[in-house]
Amino acid sequence: MFKFSSLVAAANSQSVWTTGSGGINTLEAVSGLEMQLNVAHLEVNDEGNDGSVSLHVPDWSQLEVAGEPDLPILRASMALPRGVTNLSGLRAVAHSTKTEMVPLSTWGESIEPSKGKCPLCEPCNATAPVLSAYAGKYPAGDVVTIQGIQTWRDVHYVTVEVQPVSVDHSNGVAEVLRSCSIKLEGLVVESPPEPLGIEPGFHEAYKFFFLQLGAHCARVHHERAERACPGGVRWLP
């Protein structure tokens, strides 16, 4: 069950709700084709005197769709194994999900409508709610989705999005995804071709971008795994 603690007493107060999952908020690679999500707590920002709040996963992004509920989204990129085929069949599937239903009144009366993407040098514009987004479950789609497959030289990579909170204003409830395993499925891995020449600094330059580079490739590299990656970077199987 969620527990409450006050962080800031200010004009727009901020509070923290813990989910009971323990640990910290993470979306990290556990293998070359799998990520682990843990949502340990949410920030709840009181947006005014009308009972509206916005929800955030600290250090991650917001949906930023103008007029629709201001909810968090987590995005991460995974480099795919060399030699993959059938990219059109790739899908991200959530396993071992742990969710919790929360009365919306636990946080406030409603979720503040997002102001969208704000200008860098100007204040955000006030935005009227999109009524359809406040009738029924929002977001209505899958919690875990793939938002694009890209190629850099001979490296394919995929962007995965996780929307850990959905809200149903009509029924006054929210659903929080506390944790899950996210697996990339539907790929076929053939014998990898000879890699293109990639700078030796590839690992250092891109470990912030590809989840499994920062978390795992260094370990595999130091263990002198036999499966090599471009420029000396080594991928997980």
Image: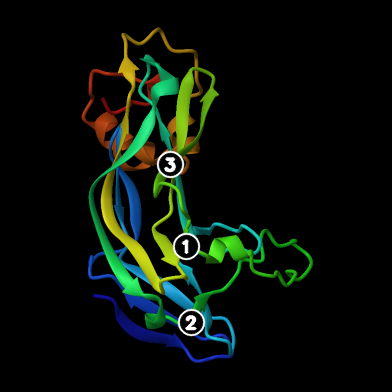
The mark that comes first in sequence, 2 or 3, is 2
Q: Residue 228 location in percent, x, y?
A: 32, 19
Q: Position of residue 45 (x, y in %)?
A: 50, 78
Residue shown at 43%/12% (left/top)?
A: 195
**Image quadrant where residue 185 sits:** top left
Q: Position of residue 37 (x, y in %)?
A: 31, 52
Q: Which of 218/101 is in front?
A: 101
Q: For residue 105, what is the image quadrant?
A: bottom left
**Is residue 65 shown to the viewer in this render?**
yes
Indicate the amino acid at tag 3.
Thr
Which residue: 32% across, 16% down?
188
Vertical side of 116 occupied by 202: above or below: above
The residue tagged 2 is 109
Residue 214 in percent (x, y) is at 37, 41
Q: Secondary structure at mark 1?
A: loop
Give the colour scheme of this rendering. Answer: rainbow
Task: Decide which of tag 3 and tag 1 comes sooner along the chain.
Answer: 1
Q: Hey, which quadrant is residue 194 in on the image?
A: top left
From this viewpoint, is residue 69 visible?
no
Q: Are marks 2 and 3 in contact (CB under 8 Å)?
A: no
Name the residue beneath numbered marker 1: 136
As drawn, the label of residue 145 is: 3
Q: Secondary structure at mark 3?
A: strand
In the rendered image, which quarter contains the C terminus?
top left
